[in-house]
Image (cartoon, rainbow, N blue to C red):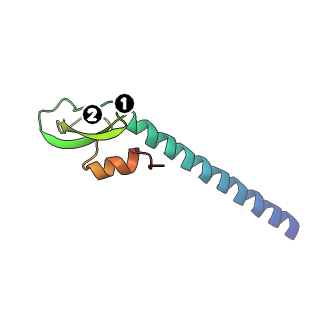
Amino acid sequence: MHVLFAASFILLQTVIFVKMDHNEQESGDKRRNICFLPKQPGPCKGAFPRFYYNKDNRSCEEFIYGGCGGNENNFKSKADCEKRCERPKQ
């Protein structure tokens, strides 16, 4: 009985570990995908300075956000954009 319980516990821990690793990988993929979205100011008429990651220049650049719509490649600060999208210098 104890052996069965121990085996079940080990199997459960393995499944949880594999699932957590898979979620972290998906999160990293989503992070990169956000950074490759195009600049989108949105349809509204506001004028909010924001930053987006320019995949062609490989840098974060300022743009004017209208205040609604757009996409997730939209950061309130250059530091937030760089933290999310720029690769560490090697």
In the foreground, 55 or 32: 55
Question: Residue at horizontal 15%, vertical 32%?
Answer: 44
Judge the density around disc 1: few (<14), some (14-19), many (≥20) Cα neighbours within 10 Å. Answer: few
Q: Position of residue 57 (x, y in %)?
A: 34, 33
Alpha carbon distance from label 1 to label 2:
19 Å
Q: Image quadrant for the N terminus?
A: bottom right
Residue furthest to the front in view is: 90
Question: Residue at horizontal 37%, vertical 37%?
Answer: 58
In the foreground, 15 or 28: 28
In the foreground, 18 or 62: 62
Question: Residue at horizontal 28%, vertical 45%?
Answer: 75
Location of mark 2 (residue): 70
Mark on residue 25? none
Q: Is residue 88 above or below residue 6?
A: above
Q: Position of residue 14 (x, y in %)?
A: 72, 56
- Relative to 77, 48 lies left or right: left
Q: Position of residue 63 (x, y in %)?
A: 20, 37
Q: Position of residue 80 (x, y in %)?
A: 32, 51
Helix, strand or loop for disc 2: loop
Q: Amino acid at mark 1?
A: Asp
In the foreground, 57 or 44: 57
Helix, strand or loop for disc 1: loop
| Figure disc tally | 2
Location of mark 1 (residue): 56
Q: Is residue 32 above or below residue 83?
A: above
Q: Is residue 20 visible?
A: yes
Question: Residue at horizontal 31%, vertical 35%?
Answer: 71
Mark with earlier residue (1, 2): 1
Q: Is residue 1 visible?
A: no
Q: Amino acid at mark 2?
A: Gly
